[in-house]
Image: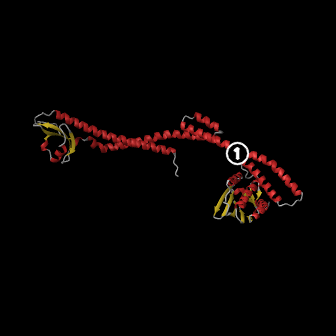
Amino acid sequence: MRRRSLRQALVRRWMLFAALLSLLFAGATVLLLFVLEDSFIDRRLRTVAATLPPDAHPLALPAHFQWVPFDRLPVPEQRRLADRTVGAIAEFRRADGRYVHALLVPAPGDARAVLLYDVTGELTVTAGLPAGMGYAAAVFAFTLLCAWLLANAFVGRAERHARRLLAQVRSAPEPASLEAMARDEPVSEFAEILRLHADVWRGRHEAIERERETLGFLAHELRTPLQSARTSLALLEEAEAVSPALPRLRRALSRLERAGNAILWLSGGTVLAGASRTHALSAMEELIDELRPLAAARLQSFSVRIAPALYWGAPLEVVETLLANLLLNAIQHGGAGVIEVEADAGRLAIGNRTAATDAPGFGLGLEIARRLAARIGWRLEMQVSGDSARCELRWPEDAAAAGTSR
C-alpha cells in the first residue's frame, strides 16, 4: 500500500475545498449579474410602458423601444406570447438575431400590443464575460495560493506538535509519564492516544514482569530436585547396577537441566552472543551421542556434516540447549530415516522426514526455540514441504568463525 504524508493529504483536501468554494462563488456571482441585468432591463421597460397613452398609439418612444400591435408581430412571436396576459414580460431572440424584452400592454378596443425593448447592445454581462474570465482565473489562482499557504501554516504547526509529541513518547521512561503528558495535552485526540499508549505499555510491562517472575520461580524450584536427582543417579552408577533405566534417567536429567537453563535465559533480556566461543562439531557430537538411543528406538539415525574448524560465538550451554530442542523435535515429530545435520559459516540445517501420524511443528516449543536463538543473535526458520521438514539456524557473518584448532 502506497503511504502518503498526512500533511500532504490535508493540504490537498483544503485546496480542493477552496477550489470548489471559489467555483461556487464564481458561478453564483455570474448568475446574480444576469439576474440583476434582467431586472434593470425589465424595470426600464415597465417605466417606459407607464408613460404610454392608454388608448392611443404612442407618438415617440426612447431609443431601442418599439410599440407593435399584437396582430402585426411575426407568427412565431405571436405563438410565443399567445398565452401571456397584459403586464407579462418575455425575452427572446428575434429572427434577425436581435435580443429583445417584450411587455404586453393594452391597446384600443380591448386589443393587445407589445412594447419591445431591443437590448442587444446593452447585454453588458455577456459582453464582459471573456474579460471577466481572465480576472476570475487570476482570483482563482490567488485563492488557491492563499489556501495552500494557510493550510501549510496550520498543518505545519500540527505536524511539528505531533513530531514533538512522538519524541516525548519515545523518551518517556514509564507509563506514568505518558499519563502526565496526556493531562497537559491541549488536543483531546492526542491526549486520548497518549492515554491508550500508556494503558497498552502498562499492560505489556505487567505481562512481562509476570512472565519473568514465573520463569524465575520455575528456575529456582527446578534446581533443588535436579541436584537431588543427579546425586541419586551418581549413587546408582557407583553401585555398578546395570539397568536400562539408567541411560533414560540420565537423558531425562540432562533435558531437565537444559530446560532450567532455558528458563533462566528467557527470563532475562540480555543478548548472549559473543560471550564465548563453542566448537560446533564437538557440541553436536556430544548431543547426538546422548540422543542416539532415543533416535534408534524410532528407527532413526544421524548424518552430520560440520566443518571441524567451525566455531560459534555463543556460550556452549545456550547452544547446547537450543540444538537439543531442535534435535528432539526432529526425533519426536519425524519418521523413520536419516536426520541430516549440516552447518557452514552462515547457517545450520536439520532435515528429516515427517511422521505420517504426527503433524510436524513445534507449537509453543517453536516460539521458545526462536526466543533462545534470539538471545544469542541467531534466527530460526522452519520449512515443511511434502513429507520432509527442515529447520535452519542463521547467524550474522561475524557470529561464526573458522579456526585451525579447538
Expressed as whole percent of the image width and height from the top left, the position of residue 73 reads 14, 44
Residue 113 against residue 342 in the figure, above or below? above
Disc 1 marks which amino acid? Glu
Question: Looking at the rendering, which quadrant does residue 52 occupy?
Answer: top left
**Residue that mark 1 sits on:** 211
Question: Looking at the rendering, which quadrant does residue 110 occupy?
Answer: top left
State the residue at coordinates (80%, 54%).
253
Packing grade of label 1 (10 A; few <14, some 14-19, many >=20) is: some
Q: In the picture provided, is 180 more to the left or to the right than 373?
A: left
Q: How many marks?
A: 1
* Residue situated in front as seen by the camera: 235 or 5: 235
* Residue situated in front as seen by the camera: 245 or 157: 245
Q: Can residue 66 be seen from the camera position used here?
A: no
The quarter of the rendered structure image containing the C terminus is bottom right
Helix, strand or loop for disc 1: helix
Q: Which color mode does the image show?
A: secondary structure
Expressed as whole percent of the image width and height from the top left, the position of residue 97 reads 20, 47
State the residue at coordinates (68%, 44%).
208
Residue 347 against residue 16 in the figure, above or below? below
Expressed as whole percent of the image width and height from the top left, the position of residue 367 reads 68, 53
Expressed as whole percent of the image width and height from the top left, the position of residue 298 reads 74, 64
Q: In the picture provided, is 122 more to the left or to the right than 232?
A: left
Q: In the picture provided, is 128 more to the left or to the right than 398?
A: left
Residue lying at the far right of the rendered structure: 239
Q: Can residue 184 be seen from the camera position used here?
A: yes
State the residue at coordinates (29%, 42%).
128
